[in-house]
Image (cartoon, grey):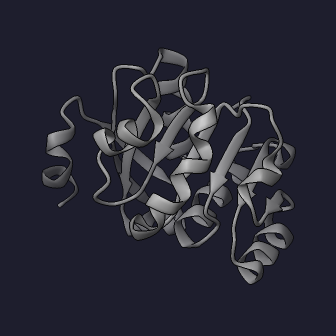
Amino acid sequence: MGDTILLAGGGKMGSALLAGWMERGVNAGDVTVVEPDQETAKKVSERFGVTVVTEPGGTGDAAPGAVVLAVKPQSMDAAISVYTGFAGGETVFLTIAAGKTIAYFEDHLGPGAAIVRAMPNMPAAVGRGITVASANANVGDGQLRLCDSLLRAVGVVAWIDDEGLMDAVTA
């Protein structure tokens, strides 16, 4: 995949994505996981051999190719603000938070942020999922390919142009 990845959230779905990436040959040195729960952080570090930090400030200054937001929707307000510094540059934000629209992320990250909203289903946890994704107008071709590759690590990906159809196609 070639780009560095910052994964916010090492829980079930975050770990499923990470497992898929590792199986596809992503270098552990290209991934940093932000996981505030110490026990989960330790498990992720031991299982995958990636850098795991408990605070977002421990991720360094370099902008990642992708920030993958795999935190629970009810925790997103608290989590998102620390990543605004990456918005508007080369970083694409890939979110799997249910119910949080692209407009929500544009409001929090700014109008220049490249955002992909994706909804993987539960079989993604075992690499057999189907994910529906939609991108905002700021997402470039390379960013779209990166997100597609990240999501394909856990199954089939279908892209939709109209985010308003997300609920219908995920049902």
Q: Tell me: 32 left or right of 141.
A: right
Pick the residue in front: 78 or 103: 78
Q: Quadrant of the C terminus?
A: bottom left
* Quarter where residue 85 is shown: top right
Q: Position of residue 115 (x, y in %)?
A: 43, 34
Examine the rendered structure and indicate whether residue 42 appears above or below residue 31: below
| Residue drawn 82% across the image and 76% down it | 42
* Quarter where residue 44 is shown: bottom right
Q: Tell me: 21 left or right of 28.
A: left
Q: Position of residue 14 (x, y in %)?
A: 58, 62
Q: Quadrant of the N terminus?
A: top right
Residue closest to the far bottom: 39
Q: Position of residue 4 (x, y in %)?
A: 74, 36
Pick the residue in front: 45 or 145: 45
Q: Position of residue 50 (x, y in %)?
A: 83, 57
Examine the rendered structure and indicate whether residue 32 appears above or below residue 84: below
Examine the rendered structure and indicate whether residue 29 appears above or below residue 44: above
Q: How many marks?
A: 0
Q: Tell me: 125 left or right of 82.
A: left
Pick the residue in front: 108 or 152: 108
* Quarter where residue 40 is shown: bottom right
